[in-house]
Image (spheres, rainbow, N blue to C red):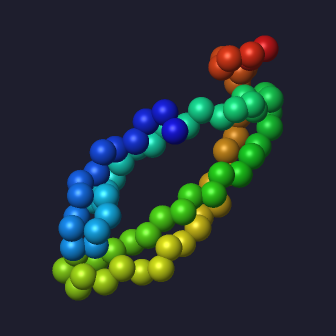
Amino acid sequence: MTAAPAGTRDNGVRAQVLRGRGEFGFLLIPAPRPDTEATAILRYQICNDVTQRCYPPARLPIPIGWSGPSTGPGGR
């Protein structure tokens, strides 16, 4: 992970939490070849601050497409 929001410590749930929105950055190694696709799996958990209820963690597949020249380390 190259970037992530800091979030805040919530002692009620004994965890670091992110409220609202946040941006995360990742470096794909090895860099994808041009015109290829991959799938990342995002694991997340949603909690309601009003009802103090947290739902079980869920997974969401996210397609990652690359259509430009590789610019990372070892790129062509």
Q: Position of residue 34 (x, y in %)?
A: 78, 28
Residue 29, by quadrant, is top right
Q: Position of residue 12 (x, y in %)?
A: 21, 73
Q: Position of residue 43 (x, y in %)?
A: 54, 63
Q: Residue at x 23, y 58 (%)?
A: 9
Q: Residue at x 40, y 42 (%)?
A: 4
Q: Position of residue 2 (x, y in %)?
A: 49, 33
The answer to which of 42 and 64 lies nearer the viewer is: 42
Name above or below for residue 48 compared with residue 68. Answer: below
Q: Is residue 5 visible?
A: yes
Q: Residue at x 72, y 29 (%)?
A: 31
Q: Quadrant of the C terminus?
A: top right
**Mark count:** 0
Residue 15, by quadrant, is bottom left
Residue 61, by quadrant, is bottom right
Determine whether, in the image, residue 14 is placed left or right of residue 1. left
Q: Residue at x 36, y 79 (%)?
A: 54
The answer to which of 36 and 22 lies nearer the viewer is: 22
